[in-house]
Amino acid sequence: MELAFSAEDTAFRDEVRTWLAEHAPRERRPKGGPEMRAFDLAWQRQQFEAGWAGIAWPVEFGGRGLPLTQQLIWYEEYAKLGMKAIDTRFVGLSHAGPTLIARASQEQQANHLPPILRGDVVWCQGFSEPEAGSDLASLRTRAELDGDELVITGQKIWTSYAHLADWQELLVRTDPELPRHKGITWVICDMQSPGIEVRPIHTMDNGADFCEVFYDEVRIPVTNVVGGMNNGWSVAMSTLSFERGTAFTIDQVQLSSTVERLIELARDRALLGDDEIAYALARARADVAALRSLTYLGISRNLRSSEPGPEGSMLKLQWADLYKRIMRLAVEILGPGSLAVDPEGGDIWSELFLLSYGISIGGGTSEIQRNIIAERVLGLPR
Amino acid sequence: MDLLPSKEQEEIVASAAAFLATALPTQRTRQLISEASNVDAKAWLAAADLGWFALGLPSDLGGVGCGLADEVLLFREIGRSLAGGPFLATTLAARVAAYGGNSQLCSEISLGGRVGLGVLGPESTLDPGGVVGTLHVVDGDDTELILVATHERAALFTQADLGELVALECIDPTTRLARATTAGAAPVVAVAADVDPVALRGTALVAAELTGIAEATAVLAAEHAKNRIQFGRPIGVNQAVKHPCADMAVRAELALAQTTVAALALDEGRTDAELQCLNALVVAADAAERNAAGTVQVLGGMGFTFEHDTNLYVKRAFLLAQLLGPVRPLLARLVLLPGPQ
């Protein structure tokens, strides 16, 4: 057992820290639209040119093939920049990209992976539908085979950055006769295709990154199918274990910094003498520490065995609960100061507080995470 | 960075678990409830023979030379097993004797001399001159020495110097409790926290016992949810039962992870070791108490009986969370410490 990182890992951390200190964008990220996309992609290109793109991606796909501990270190250092963890690059780098690595043909990989790492393209996800949320396998967006094309008609929802995306990882029903999980296909969809209409959704935190996507006889070449027709469910599931417990590192480190900033804030306002606030902050500090320790434990398990452990759902669930609790505590500490959205000084506690309502929904609701833990880890009956 | 036990450490765990299952099964712990002493003398000496009370003591001080992380693995098994007796106080007392320069006493303790624990009351104090005030004495009714530890120092006192012990019935029936009030007792041997952070190590060890309880109860609840049939189906199909079971598993994992990190932080001399140890106690105490409570609920009427072990876990968790003083002052201290490394 050892908490200290190896000499190589420590040297890597120094290198990352130095590079990020010199190169991280100093200007504020634009709040939306094409400017935000351009900002994210320019930042990705800069990382790519310096050799920081795809740290854990295999070398044959343009990545650096570095061990999981160094992926963790990158995320830990990146988190300190205070930049958003999930931006327009997220689906390409952390979801679609890893899926293509796991399941796509060589030609598909050659066409799509380098542009993701280079920062040429934005990907989005087309999984959820109005009638297929937690019950994803009931999705109904239809794809009919017509010659060497799939003709797609239906609707997706909760698609982040669809209005800014070039490509979409899209789940469609290719055989309605087969059992639910069997008739689904994972396909690469060109977002510029005729017949696609994107409508932004205004969310309660005043964001407009969420979209609905409508498909009216959209034609996609069959060569864009990944992993074979009607194999989409297994392709979609293969994504989930890729980052093996490091996926929430940035969010988690940032939540830890948030607690430290709140302690400072409470001290500045002489609120640490208020027992309730002091105790709540102490518990928050202990709980974010444990969240980080669980990430480390998960990575330790992954270094010994390639089987993904139970940490993924546990981390997501605990992170969401904590995030909500901590943002609620933040607005309590701020008092009337939390009433103004985006006050001077750049702290956006009120927006983060509003955002926290969605944290336990997106990426699998907390209820579904509890089902997964109970059924797959503890073996409770369905 | 590797938070998993090595092969040698896995052997420590396996041998500890096997010893506890054979020498101190819950059945035996229950028998001892009604006997004069709650400690099985033979098993206690056997544990001493295995090196349990000097496991984390450096070899040049007569110890086994393992780290706090190894002791944490052992105490997790003790917590899981519900074994009674002053394992914590005896282990810490060996350190006080060793670092206080009394190697003879250290050796006596390591070889099986039991030491009880004195828990300071709100008005009581421990300073270099000694201890003043009222103490709750845990498993110290028939021991010659009593350990008292704060985050500033730790000291051993003879029971006789602390005055007459008034026997009390402990909420945890597998533990012996008494009260002592002293106008001032001088220590036999003492050590300041900057020489050896005895209480802080105790914090990690208590967190480890609590982790063991959180894990054991999470398993009990999940097994019951799988096997108990009502309305023609296992009760675990219901999310009202299934989700609490999931939450218990998460809390147990968090407690395990944080307790491991805390022990390693102290072993490796990190600047945030104190914070990490307090974090571990807070997280593990919460996990043990809530998991034990959740298990009573999942088990229903059976969980409320004395016959089922769940109530012993509830009571032990409650006791452990108070051994190093109440949690609230600890939280007040935690929030004032410098941030994580």
Image (tube, rainbow, N blue to C red):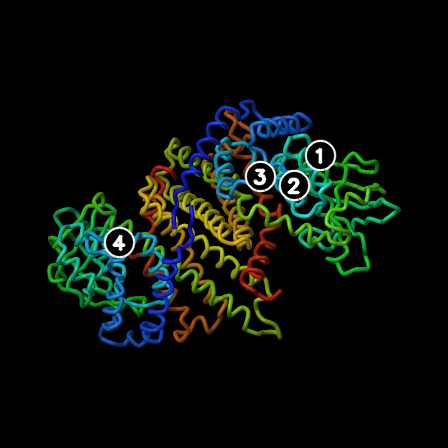
Q: Amino acid at mark 2?
A: Gly
The answer to which of marks 1 and 3 sits earlier in the sequence is 1
Check contact, mark 4 vs mark 3: CB within 8 A.
no
Secondary structure, mark 1, is: loop
Q: Gap between marks 4 and 3, in whole Å?
A: 52 Å
Location of residue B292 with respect to A211 vertically, above or below: below
Residue to which mark 3 is pinned: A354
Where residue B58 appears, x then y in whole percent?
24, 52
Q: Nearer the viewer, mark 2 or mark 3?
A: 2
The mark lying in front, picked from 1 and 3, is 1
Q: Amino acid at mark 1?
A: Ala
- Labels 1 and 3 share a subunit: yes
Horizontal side of A19 relative to B83 (left or right) equals: right
In three-dimensional space, the C-alpha distance between marks 4 and 1, rounded to whole angstroms, equals 59 Å
Residue A256, image x, y percentages: 45, 40
Quarter residue B110 falls in: bottom left
Residue labelled with disc 1: A165
| Cβ atoms at labels 1 and 2 below 8 Å apart | no
Residue type at tag 3 = Leu
The correct choice, above or below, for B37 with respect to A174 in the image is below
Circle 3 crowding by C-alpha within 10 Å: few under 14, some 14–19, many from 20: some
Q: Residues within 10 Å of mark 2 (few under 14, many from 20)?
A: many
Q: Which residue is mark 2?
A: A97
Upstream in sequence: badge 1 or badge 2: 2
In the picture, the disc for residue B65 is: 4
Q: Residue A83: x, y in percent?
A: 54, 32
Is residue A197 visible in this depiction of the protein?
A: yes
Residue lying farthest front? A60
Q: Are marks 1 and 2 on the same chain?
A: yes
Q: Nearer the viewer, mark 4 or mark 1?
A: 4
- Say which amino acid is labelled 4: Gly
